[in-house]
Image (spheres, rainbow, N blue to C red):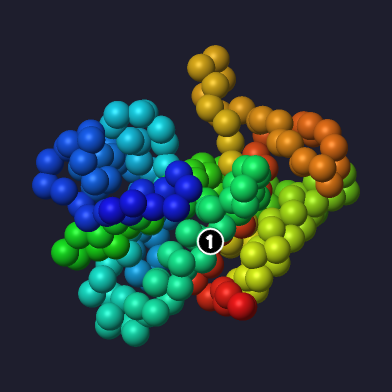
Amino acid sequence: TGGAGRMGCGASSGGFAPDGPIGLSHFRIERVVGEGGYGKVKYVIRKDTKGDYAMKCLDKHKLIEKQAVHMALLERAILVDLSTPDPGRLPCTFVTNLHFSFADTHFAYLVMDLALGGTLKYQMRSHPRGYPEEHARFYAAQIFLGLAHLHSKCILYRDCKLDNILLKVLHSKTRPWVAGRAWLGSHFGAWRDVQADGFIMLSDFGASEKFA
């Protein structure tokens, strides 16, 4: 039931046991934040640490019915790879990182970084004429860094579209959901202000391919 890096893998247990294998009982479900062809994505909070995550709940019966078991296993394998940083490095913040994975009789669960800002496609509805150039350049730089990280892991990202570009927001006690600041690392060497609809994170790696 061990995992690579900071990730845990195990089977869902019947009751909440803080020191036992990670399972569904370790999380409190807040609400559904997305839905796809194989299940739902839920906003969850881990009961003991109060950390918040996105939990992707994949219906095993639908995966078998739609012959998508291989795709689900591939996505998990790629998430494990992306979430296991090289020695001395931190995980990339511009791709979805996997924290835990486990399964029960009917579902497989992937517990990942949470992004409550919605998709870039959704956010662009409030910008019918497009983003200001500086704003667009900032998002483009983050997408580039996410793709560069994928390529450094020899992963071909085949599903880069607005629906799969998520936006994060940071929680504040005084202002419920506010803009944050994102570190662009050695590529840009500075902190940059992030607009109110958050900074980006690439997601959904089921159609991706890993090269040796």
30 left or right, relative to 210: left
Q: Can you tell which quarter of the image residue 197 is in? A: top right
66 left or right, relative to 4: left
For the point 57% across and 31% down, the residue is 170
Q: Can you tell which quarter of the image residue 181 is in? A: top right
Amino acid tagged 1: Asp
Q: Can you tell which quarter of the image residue 107 is in? A: bottom left
Residue 206 in picture, x, y percent from top left: 49, 71
For the point 33% across and 35% down, the residue is 46
User: For the view shown, which residue lies furthest in the left direction?
Assistant: 14
Residue 199 to residue 68: above or below:
above
User: For the view shown, which residue lies furthest in the top direction?
Assistant: 174
Q: Which quadrant, please, contains the C terminus?
A: bottom right
Residue 127 in picture, x, y percent from top left: 73, 49
Q: State whether residue 157 appears in this view.
A: no
Identify the residue position indicated by label 1 in the image. 81
Residue 51 in picture, x, y percent from top left: 41, 33
For the point 20% across and 52% down, the residue is 12
- Mark 1 nearby-residue class (10 Å; few <14, some 14–19, many ≥20): some
